[in-house]
Amino acid sequence: MTVTDSLTLADRIEDLLPQTQCTKCGYAGCRPYAEAIALGEANYNQCPPGGVEGIARLAGLLGQPVIPLNPANGIERPRPLAVIDENLCIGCTLCMQACPVDAIVGAPKQMHTVIEALCTGCDLCVPPCPVDCIAMVPATGERTGWDAWSQELANAARERYEQRNARLAREREAAEARAAARRASSSASAAADAPSVAASSAAVTSTTVVADDPEARKRAIIQAALDRARRKKEELAAQGKGPQNTQQVSADVQAQIDAAEARRRRLGIAQDDNASDAAPSTQDASGTQPPKS
């Protein structure tokens, strides 16, 4: 097996990194940085926590010379630990969300604290703190780089980092499942309510139009009365009962019928099925047809 296999090479490079997940290399974690080195997209001198010894380890694997740490990525220093001033902490949880190895414990609006044995000194919890209550305190005296770290600590940090990522993935999947269930429930409810909603919408639209137009309101009132009269007529016809007082009406009554029909025609609501019934009569008061001219 040779180092020309990029995937295998990335695995071997990652094994040589300190697993602080500090992102100082310019990548989101040690694994992405290892993959970038394996692909030739990043140099092997971009890891401040590994320091000079870390560069020497990578150079030996890659068959390259030992080169200085790139100052653009930071400096080699004693390993620090995050310390939270508990009197200032407001419990915003932003530091907990930023910690790549779950080394900070607490609850919303409650005091947070750092588990020293788990802290990798990555500094990632400092920038998001809104009250600047986190300090990075040197914890290894003059020892820097791999002298201030160990393979055992690196392995433990890597395991916690992977466990955290797995937990976050489960939480995202659970949240997405809950959101999908809510959308499905909302869609089902909307489908069930669609007929009534459509009817209500139509009624509201119709009411709005009628309310804004006096003539439309008048026509609507007359139309509603005609509809009621038509239904009543149909019910009576079904019972074998015809309308009363339709023969031999007086001239005054007939004049009122004729005037009502004329108004209906002007308003544009005359009904075809009532045209013959409501047509103006040409009878005189005696009920006889007048002679044609």
Image: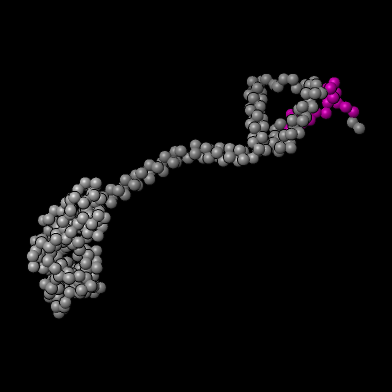
Establish if 140 lies above or below 258: below
Q: Residue at x 24, y 63 (%)?
A: 28
Q: Residue at x 70, y 34 (%)?
A: 271
Check if residue 286 falls in the magenta segment: yes
Check if residue 279 falls in the magenta segment: yes
For the N terminus, give its image quadrant: bottom left
Q: Is residue 44 visible?
A: no
Q: Position of residue 210 (x, y in %)?
A: 62, 38
The span shown in magenta is 275-291
Q: Which residue is the extreme one toward the front?
A: 87
Q: State how the image is colored.
A: one colour
For the C terminus, give its image quadrant: top right
Q: Is residue 43 visible?
A: yes
Nearer to the camera, 230 or 218: 218
Q: Quadrant of residue 228?
A: top right
Q: Which residue is the extreme one toward the bottom?
A: 65
Establish if 219 lies above or below 79: above
Nearer to the camera, 86 or 121: 86
Q: Position of residue 249 (x, y in %)?
A: 79, 21
Q: Residue at x 46, y 38 (%)?
A: 193
Q: Main secondary structure of the magenta part?
A: loop
Q: Residue at x 16, y 58 (%)?
A: 82
Q: Position of residue 126 (x, y in %)?
A: 22, 59
Q: Quadrant of residue 72?
A: bottom left
Establish if 255 lies above or below 13: above
Q: How many marks?
A: 0
Query: Is 89 positioned to the left or the right of 240 in the image?
Result: left
Q: Position of residue 41 (x, y in %)?
A: 25, 73
Q: Which residue is the extreme one toward the right?
A: 293
